[in-house]
Image (cartoon, helix red, strand yellow):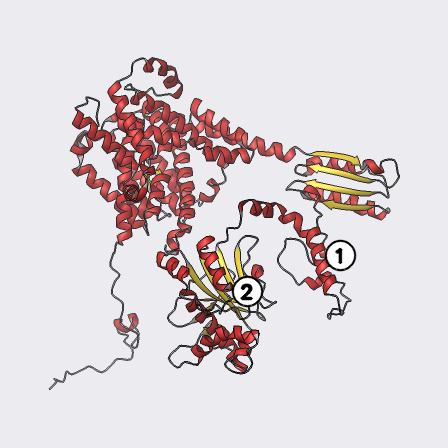
Amino acid sequence: MSACVPTRPADPTRTDESSRTHPPHSPPPKPPRRFRISGADLSASGAVFLIALPLSLGIALATGAPLQAGLVAAAVGGLVAGRLGGSPLQVSGPAAGLTVVTADLIHRYGWRTTCAITVIAGLAQIGLGCLRVARTALAVSPAVVHGMLAGIGVAIAVAQLHIVLGGTPQSAVLDNLRALPAQLTNVDLAALLLSLLTLAVLFTWPRLPGRAGRALRRVPAALVAVACATATAAFAGISVTKVDLPSWSSHALATMPEGPVLGLAAAVLTVTLVCSVQSLLGAVAVDKLASSKPTLRPEARRSDLDRELLGQGAANIVSGTLGGLPVAGVAVRSAANVNAGGESRNSTMLHGVWVVVAALLMVPALELIPLASLAALVMAVGIQMVSLHHIRTVTRHREILVYVVTTLGVVVLGVLEGVALGIAVAVGVALHRLARTRITHSVDEADAEGQGGTHHVRVRGQLTFLAVPRLSRVLHQVPQGTRCVVELDGSFMDHAAFESLQDWQKSHVGQGGKVEVTGRAGTRIAEPASASNSCCRPWTPWRNHHCDRPQTETAAPPAGSGGYQLASGISAFQRNTAPHVRDELARLAREGQRPTQLFLTCADSRLVTSMITSSGPGDLFVVRNVGNLVPLPGAESGDDSVAAAIEYAVDVLKVQSITVCGHSGCGAMQALLNSPPEGGAQTPLKRWLRHGLPSLARMAAANQPWARLAGRAPADAVEQLCLTNVVQQLEHLRAHESVTRRLQEGSLELHGMYFHVGEAQAYLLTEQPDEVFDQVEPEGELHRA
C-alpha cells in the first residue's frame, strides 16, 4: 500500500528550478568527472623525475646559485608551467641554456636580486602572452638560435671543466680559458677520476647491447652515472667536495632589485628572451614528437604557444618568488616524457610532485653526491649543445656565418649581445642575397656570325626593383627580331621587375622577335592559360589530359589514335614534368623505395591513386586488380600475386598501413550481382571474381549490418556491394600471417576507403560498431578502421 501525499496545484506562472536545469524528458545528469591519472602518465612522470633530479642540482651548481634553487625551479616548472602552459607534454624546469645568463646575474647583482629579475621576466612573459606575439618569436633565424645554444654550451663546458679538475670556475668564459693552463697543473686526482667515471657511464649506458641492455636502458643514464660515482666515493672512502643542501629555513627568497636601472632592464630582457625562445622552440619540437604517436589525444599533439608563454611567465614568477632558478621548457626532459608514454599534462605535474617529495625526504641521500660528478654531467650537456647536426644544417643553407658570429658573440660578449649581433648578421646576409643579382648576356657561338642567333639573358639571384636598371640595360642589348631566352635563376621577383620584363617581352615580340622565359636549369615556365590552348601545366593538381587538344576538336578520339596519344603524353612528360621531378626521382633511385602505405584498389581507369591521396613518387606501394579483391591465403590456385605483394610490402618494405579502396560504379561488383561465378564456363574473369563471393554472402546475411555512407543508405545494390566488399577484404587481409603478426605488434594499421567517382568525394571507414563510411572534408582527419 502506498500513502497518498497531497500535492499543491501547479502554478503556471512559476518555473521550477529543476525544470530549468534539466528538461522533463532529458536523461539524468552525468556524475561529475573524477580526476584520474593513467598508468602511462604515472610511469612517464617517474622517468622524467629521474632525469630532472641530477640535472637540476647540476645546473644550480653551474650557476653558483643555492642548490635548493634547482629543486625549486624543477618543482615549480612541473606544477605551475605543467598546469597552466599550452604544451601539455613539454617539461619545464631549470634549463642549461639559462646557465650562463643566471651565473652572470648572480655575479653582478647577487642571488636575491637575480630572483627578483626572474619575477619581473615572468611578468614580461605574461605581457607578451597577452599580446599574442608567441608566433613572432619563431621568426628568429634558426642559425641564431642554434648559435646561441652552442655559445652557451661552450661557456658551460669550459666553466664545469674547472670543477671536474678540482678547481673553482671564474665568472667569465675568457677568464676560465686563461685560467685553464694553471688549473691543468693543479689537478685533484680524486675529483677527476669520479668525473671520468660519470662520463664513462653516461655515454656507455645508452649503448648496452642485447635484451638485458634494452631493459637496463629504461633507467636514465644521467641518474645511473651520478649514482655510480656516488656509490664509488662512498664505498672507496674518497674524500671530495659533496653536495651541501642548507636547511630550508635559511633558504633565500626574492627581494627588491638593487642596481643600475639600465643594467636591470637589460638583465630582464635577456632572461625574458632566452626563456621565451627556448620554451617556444621546445614546444614546437614536442609537437613534432607527439605527431608520431597516433594514440595521443588531439589536444596533446598541438601546443597553444600564447598559452605556453603565459604558463612559463607564471612559473617564473612563482619560482623567483620562492628563490628558484629561471624556468624554461627543456628539450631533454620533454623528449623523455613523450618517449616514455606520457599522455597528458598529468605526467609533467606529477614529476614536479616527485621533486617536492625528494627535496623534503631525500636530503641525506642527495648530500652524498660528489660535486665533481654533477659538474661532469652538466659539462656533457654543454658539449651536446654544440650540435654537429645543426652545424651541417646551417652550412647547407649557407648560414654558417650567422651561426659562427652568434656563437662567438655569446662566448665573448654575453647572451644578449651575441644574439643581437647574430640577428644583425642574419639581416645583413638576407639583404645581401636580396640585392645581389648577376645579369649576363651571351649569344650562341654557332650562330654568333649570323643575324638570327639565339641570345641568352641569364639572371642569377633575386630580381627586385634594385636590379631593374641593369635588367633593362641588358635586355635592350638584344637586337630586334631575334630569338631570346631569358633564364631566371632565383626564387623571388617583385612587381617592378615583372612589369619591366613583361613590357620588354611584348615590345620584342611585336617587332618580330621570339622570347622564351625559363627557370633554373632551362626548364620552361608555363604561359598563362589565356595565352595558349593548353590548360595543363607541369607539376600542378591533376586535370583532364584531353585539355591538351584544341577546343574545337571533338570529344571522341579518332580511330587508331592510341599510339599517338601515348607518344604525345610521353613527350609532354619529358618536356614539362620531368625537369621538375628529376632530382626527386634521382634521390629515390639512389635510396630505394620506402613507401609508408600499401594501397590496394581496383584497376578502374577512373581511379587515379596519386590524385585522390595527394601522393607523389615513392609514397604508395600500389596493387591494382579487378574489384580490389584480397584472396584468402592459399585460395589463389597458383596465382599468388596479391599475397606476394602483401608479404613484400609488410615484411620487406615495412609499410605502416594498408588501405583497401573501393569505388562507385565498379564493374566487377556489377558482374558479381548479375552472374555470380558459381557455374557455367569458368573464364579467367569468373575464376578471379569468385574471391568476391564472400562479399556477396556478407551483404545477403541477415545478421550482418549493412554498410552506410555518411549516415545515408547506399543508392542501390551495386553501391551496397561495393561498400560491403571493402569491409570483407579487410577481413581477408587480417587472415594473412604477416599482417596478423604486425597487427599484434601494433605497428600496422588497416584502413577502408570508398571513392565516389561522380562526386569526387572520398569516404573512410570509421571505428564505429556499424560499418559506416564517413565523408572526408577538405580539412578533415583520417579515421582508422
Image location of residue 755, percent across then percent down: 53, 68
**Three-letter amino acid code at the position of disc 2:** Arg
Q: Nearer the viewer, residue 132 or 767?
A: 767
Q: Residue at x 38, y 45 (%)?
A: 308
- Reading the image, the residue beneath label 1 is 532
Under mark 1, the amino acid is Ser
Q: Residues within 10 Å of mark 2 (few under 14, many from 20)?
A: some
Above or below, 754 against 410 in this view is: below
Up-down relation of residue 613 to residue 145 (above or below)? below
Residue found at x 60% / y 67%: 606
Helix, strand or loop under label 2: strand
Label 2 vs label 1: CA separation? 36 Å
Residue 178, horizontal then vertical, whole percent: 38, 15
**Is 347 on the left or on the right of 309, as rendered?**
left
| Quarter placement of the C terminus | bottom left
Q: How many marks?
A: 2
Vertical placement of residue 361 versus 198, above or below: below
Mark in the foreground, 2 or 1: 2
Q: Is residue 715 left or right of residue 98?
A: right
Q: Residue 667, position in %: x, y?
A: 57, 75
Q: Is residue 256 visible?
A: no
The residue under label 2 is 624
